[in-house]
Image (tube, helix red, strand yellow):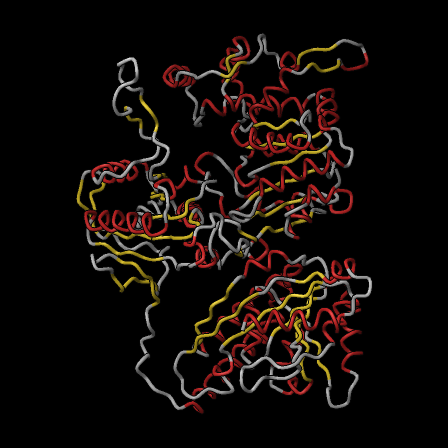
Amino acid sequence: MDAEEILKGLNSDQRAAVLHDHEKGAQLLILAGAGSGKTSVLTKRIQYRILCGVEPEKILALTFTAKAAAEMRERVQKLFPDAGVRLCTFHSLALHMLKCKIPCEGGAGGERPAYELLDFKKIPVPTEFSEREFSQALSKLKLKVKVSRENLFSDCYGAAVSTKLQPLREAVLESGQVVFEDLIYSAIQLLETNEAARKYFREQWQEILVDEYQDINPSQYRLVKGLLGDRKQLFVVGDDDQAIYGFRGADIGNIERFCEDFKESTQIRLEWNYRSVPNVLYLANDIFKNKPIHLRKMLRAGNLNGSGGNPLYKENRKPEVWVSDNPVEEIQKIVESIRELRLGYDLLWKNFAILVRYNRQRLYYEQALRDYGIPIAGDVVTGAGETENGETAPEVTVEDGVHIETVHASKGLQYAVVYYAGLCEKLTPGECTGDRKARKKQLDEERRLYYVGVTRAEACLFLLYCKCRFWKGKLRRFRRSRFLPRGMTSPAHSAKGWPVVSEKVRNQDSDFKMPVILFKIYVAATVLGYMLMYILTLPFTKPYYGKNFGAWLDHKIQDFSRFCMRRLRVDLTIEDQAQLGKVDWTRPVFIVGNHNSFADIPIVFLAIQKTVGFVAKKSLGRIPFLHFWMHKIGCILVNREKGGAAKAVREAIAERGNAVRVFIFPEGTRSKTGALGSFKSGVFRFACENDAILLPLVIKGSGPVWERRKDWGRRKVNVKVLAPVDVLECRRENEKFDPKVHMLPMVHKMMEDAL
């Protein structure tokens, strides 16, 4: 077995994570977007390190549920059946640590169980405690601070309170009957107060991996830090956008402060989503458009067929907002939609889910669907008929039924069709209480919960707002949720009256007419004004963002491109964007496309969702403000009349090395008819010289957007991303590989066929 077998199927970001060198890049934080394959990265990282010679017993991987740990263990053992990697929950780890035998200090010989070092008289055993008995014991102490059973052994209390709590702690030490948090605090005490235990456990595990890092609480963070010490071998995966357990004590600050806590650390983003269609991801990305730039992610669809392969995934449906006056109307819409989609696309009942914020909502929808004869996943029913012995058929659990889940319970799951119900104030988001700071903190978590709900959908997402419903014993009216996207409605209806298609609300000025010349003046003025605005703010922006300035620039280029599409009144469709996931962006990448319009530039930015430099005519530098931004994004300006263009491009490429990302129009000029012209060979030679990836795409309909525009009406433009070509692989397969002979005609045909 070699490393390539383990790395097979990974995209470039996943690959970089698995191959991370702690000695060079120190601790690693992986910001893993929803559906980005984080479990695969974790398990392949473990497999890779074992392949590199690390003893399996020296690897510790922590997660939050026994089920997740078992799944990871099963994957690891497919390649290494007898690997003794410790894959466990935090509480399981802490209990294991307390049972370990620690060498006595001072070289006296012998060993003692770790729990004895903490004065436990018996082996700790997690048990349920009596809330009533604990409350009665606390009341006798007459404390002025609130103490919960989970925090009995916490060191957060002052000396006076700790002294009063000592009898309660002694009782636990005497009986050994602990709760789960006692285990964590005891393990922390071992690491922070006992030198022999600290040395033993740090030698025990050479590398530490943590799953769902955004969900760890302060005590779990201290446990990880105590085990790690000042070493660099920490590999954590998390998504701050899915931090939804603040009510359990999870501290999102642990992931937000990672780069401060570990100054030399590295950060990698996993942004290729292999679950949802692009239109669902566009909505998901919009949820956090105002979050801090260094934590912002842009999810991209990485699976050409969707995760299910059903024709439904190919349609790339836009999320729909359904507005109902009452619950009866709403449930009728849901039932009719489920039946139509199930029959129309040959889906199973279990491919559908209704997501809600609160458990009492879940109970309502379960009963409502039962009333319509629709099976509910998880229901226990008696099997029909009798057995051969004449006995009543045993009870069975329904597996192929519609899932009705709270959003919290749905985390980690996915469904082809999702009906996200209760999108109204005081349900989603839930009611926030306390002072202004507390309300903001709760609202931020509610927004993250909404994101989790949205990203459960694979192919179809319906956002449901019901104006009036029974809630807590009363018929109440609800306001539309602040989270619901504006400008989305469902005016088209089927024969039975239910929404089937989502369309954007047409601009209020759709009846207004403008001469083309005035329209172009208006567009040019507003676009140049946009450029100027950010030039003026740049002296303040760059120092503010510091090392994150590049990320800020990438996002602003995307914002600018969307702004251009709005001003140009373009409806842009991007096909097969998942091809981008096949590109190894750590290598030189040359992008090629046909050229019909000046509008092709922002169109390309949106199509590849990355900032790239263009090879362009030097005369473009005369356009006010444009030259400044062309320089910022790494454009290569050449003088075609005087010659020497190839030399200028080669020099620019040499300066950028593996970081080079250049877009070149191989036709050399704009097409006046939209037909694909002949190609110049330059870009193919450059790609061959640099063993690069060549990424072709085709643009249809951009000519009438600007140069051939006849009126100010809306224009439809389509971009299709084609399969990337690995020039290095081509050269390996053909020793006499000539880019002009072998690659140029091949790419030309690919693009011509796509047009």
Q: Measuring 53% from the left and 21% from the top, which residue is drawn there? A: 182
What is the tally of numbered marks visible in this picture? Answer: 0
Could one spot residue 437 in this view of the protein? Answer: no
Image quarter in which the N terminus is found: top right
* Percent x, y of residue 370: 24, 36
Which quadrant of the structure image shows residue 409? Answer: top left
Residue 216 position (above or below residue 612): above
Which corner quadrant holds the C terminus? bottom right
Q: Out of 519 and 400, give the one closest to the viewer.
A: 400
Q: Is residue 361 visible?
A: yes
Q: Position of residue 574 (x, y in %)?
A: 50, 66
Vertical comparison of 65 with 548: above or below: above
User: Toward which corner of the image does residue 646 lie, by quadrant?
Assistant: bottom right
Does 319 sit left or right of 68 as displayed?
left
Taking depth in this image into account, of 695 and 71 the one nearest to the observer is 695
Q: Nearer the viewer, residue 3 or 642?
A: 3
**189 displayed left or right of 142:** right
The single residue placed furthest to the front in the displayed view is: 388
What percent of the width, then of the height, locates residue 229?
Answer: 71, 33
Residue at 45% x, 78% y is 567
Judge whether 601 appears above or below 78 on screen: below
Q: Position of residue 60 (x, y in %)?
A: 66, 30
